Amino acid sequence: MTDALETATFGGGCFWCIEAAFKQLDGVESVTSGYAGGHVENPSYEAVCTGETGHAEVVQVTYDPAAFGYDELLEVFFAVHDPTQLNRQGPDVGSQYRSIVLYHDDEQRRQADAYIEALDEALDGDVVTELEPLETFWEAEEYHQDYYEKNPDDAYCTFHAQPKIEKVREKFESKLAS
């Protein structure tokens, strides 16, 4: 790892699933579940679940760009969720589960915009992923952090997180942490 770590923020359904998928990658220093993109200060999980705070469940990924680039993070992100589903992922329905990339700088915005545009063309215009600047990231409650690691036998994890983890293991085999 270099000393120049960077941060990326993504939302694509339940943060438990997205967090677990990113955590296994070499070059990813940490993944934190949280909330972003809304209008309420310091939101709680219960408030976000109402869909009235405007927040999405997101993960904040701290990574070493020399080991795993932002373009590769985008590839993982779009591989583990369906960017054509508006305000839902699988069984999770509501604006808090929307597909969103929250960029931290102009370079992330440029790369994400190009990736979304190319994906939109490949899928014939079906991508609904939002692209917005990150204003504030609110860390989710402690019991949401590392949820999959703490609860691997949880039915939700078994049916929804595990397939995403396996997809990343297959597609990004050379980029897995040892």
Image: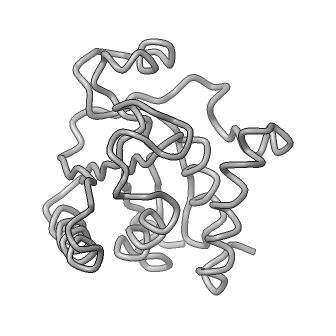
Q: Is residue 7 left or right of residue 151?
A: left
Q: Quadrant of the N terminus?
A: bottom right
Q: Quadrant of the C terminus?
A: bottom right
Relative vertical location of residue 85 with respect to residue 43 in this rendering, above or below: below
- Count of picture labels: 0
User: What residue is at 38 percent from the left and 68 percent from the top?
Assistant: 74
Relative to 97, is 68 above or below?
A: below
Residue at the spot x=47%, y=30% of the render? 139
Q: Is residue 161 left or right of residue 119?
A: right
Which residue is painted at 61% across and 59% down in the image? Answer: 21
Spot the residue most to the bottom: 174
- Picture coordinates of residue 153, whole percent (x, y): 86, 42
Q: Where is residue 115 shown, x and y percent of the image?
A: 26, 73
Q: Nearer the viewer, residue 34 or 78?
A: 78
**In the image, farthest residue toward the right:** 153
Q: Nearer the viewer, residue 77 or 89?
A: 89
Give percent across and percent down for residue 10: 38, 51
Where is residue 6? Give x, y as percent: 37, 60
